[in-house]
Structure formats: C-alpha cells, structure tokens
Image (cartoon, rainbow, N blue to C red):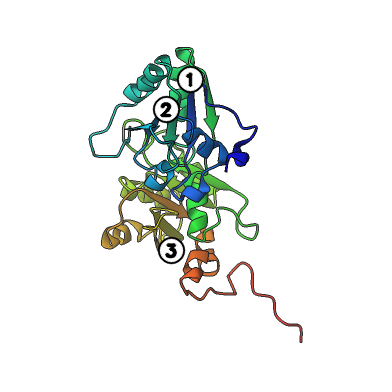
Amino acid sequence: MAGLFAGLPVLQPGSVWLVGAGPGDPGLLTLHAVHGLQQADVIVHDALVDAACLSFARPGAVLEFAGKRGGKPSPKQRDISRRLVELARAGKRVLRLKGGDPLVFGRGGEEALTLVEHGIPFRIVPGITAGIGGLAYAGIPVTHRDVTHVVTFLTGHDSSGLVPDRVDWASVAKGSPVIVMYMAMKHLGTITANLLAAGRGADEPLAFVCGASTGSQRVLETTLGEAPEAARAAGLEPPAIVVLGEVVRLRASLDWLGALEGRILSAETPFHPALKDPA
C-alpha cells in the first residue's frame, strides 16, 4: 500500500489537516485522507465519522471526539478550534476529520480561519459531501439532463439552531428544481411550510436518506406535503439528507444497492423511456 502514497504530501509536526471523511462508507475516503490518517499523532473527529474510517489511523494515534449533535451536550465550536491550535503548538501532527466535506456546512472554514489567526500551517482535504454521495447511494442523482440543470444545497438551521432567516425561500422554491437539505429534520415542518407557501406542490416527490452509504442506510420516499408526518411515522432520525424534486422518481430505476439485494429496477422512467427494439 505504501506505493499508493508515493509523492503525496507529508503531514508535518505542528500543522493541521482539515479532512473530509465522506458520507460514511470508508471506501469513499480519498488517498490524501487515508495517508493523513496513517501519519497523524492526534485525530480530532466528528460524531458523523464512521468508525470504519478511523480504523485507518496509525497505531498509537490519539483519537479525540469533538462531535456536535443537535439537542445533546456538545463541545463549543470555539473550543474545538482552539484545541487544534493547542495541539499544533505542542508539535503534534493533527488531523481534523469531519463527515462529508469540511467546507460544506461543516464549519471547516471557521476552523481554518482560527488556524490562520494563530499562524498554524494547514491543508484542506476535500471529501465527498453527503448531499451528493449519500444521494448517489440511494439511487437519486442530484442532476439529470432530462429533469434539471440546477440544484440548491441548503442547511436546515443556522449557528443559533434556528431555520436560517437569510434563506430567500421564494427564490429557492422558484429557481431550483432540486433542493438538497442538510440538517433539516429538526425544523422539517417549518421548512416544508415555507416551500409550500412559496409555491412548491404538495405532491412533489421528496426523499429522506438516513445513515447514507453505511450499513444502516434507510431511504423513505414521500411527498413534500406529507413529509413531516411520514418522517414521524417511520421514526426517522438524523443524520439525514432530504431531497426535493423530480429526480427522486429516478430511484425506481437507479437504486443500485436495492438491485444488489434483489430489487427489480424499472427500465422506464417518466424522463427517459427504455429503448424499444425497432423490430
């Protein structure tokens, strides 16, 4: 395996790598991420990082939990950022491992700015964000040329824990055929009400993907109007990605994980009929 990392950058003592772990499946880690895990003295990781990803850590590496989970006691962001500075100043090779991509609703930018403020060298290692990779594992593409050329990613709550008041719901509803929502479960009722009030149809397809790309992945297909009640009835819990738009219908044809388990996929969709034998 050593040959895979030949020529890749070295995690230096006194520096920090901000690394995306992807949505869960350890196979989605990048070579940079695995190489960093095998060099780090201390790995400061989020709650959403799958344990299998941490198995790549070198023997003797210290694992520090810094998970932030809604409604539960969590470290404050400023304390996490300061801890990274403290470890780097102690000469440690520090890897900050974050679920998904560190810069997509992951507060990686805030942590990087703290490192800059204190003169700590750092590297950003992108990861596959759950809003793309997690949906792909559910058989839902975020774009499809027969359906949409536009997709919007938004977060269901801001730093205060409330629905972001700076989201122009009317513009998002009218301008984006596909809307992918992170951290939307807590305020799902308010979010769906905003979208309905802005003109989206109650019967528009919507899907929840919980535990995306892991062995506990669950997918629930419903509609925008029925989403809050459907989520409650199914007992869905975060972490979850919520996607709204006609692309959800493509899951009937593209649920490749389901096909591996024996599901019969549809050869026809409303957007791309199966080719017919001209004879």
The residue beneath circle 1 is 13
> Height in image: 151 above or below 44?
below
Q: Residues within 10 Å of mark 1 (few under 14, many from 20)?
A: some
- Specify whether residue 220 is in view: yes
The residue beneath circle 2 is 41
Instruction: Please name the amino acid that badge 2 sits on.
Output: Asp
Instruction: Please name the amino acid that badge 1 sits on.
Output: Pro
- Specify whether residue 103 is in view: no
Labels 3 and 1: the sequence-earlier one = 1
> Height in image: 199 above or below 64?
below
> Height in image: 209 above or below 52?
below
Instruction: Name the residue: 59% across, 28% down.
Output: 9
Seen from the viewer's position, the closer of residues 204 and 255 is 255
Seen from the viewer's position, the closer of residues 13 and 128 is 13
Instruction: Please name the amino acid that badge 3 sits on.
Output: Asp
| CB contact under 8 Å: marks 1 and 2 | yes
Task: Name the spot of residue 14 as percent of width and height, x first.
Answer: 47, 18
Seen from the viewer's position, the closer of residues 56 and 180 is 56
CA distance separating discs 1 and 2? 9 Å
Residue 29 located left or right of residue 234: right
The residue beneath circle 3 is 203
Labels 1 and 2: the sequence-earlier one = 1
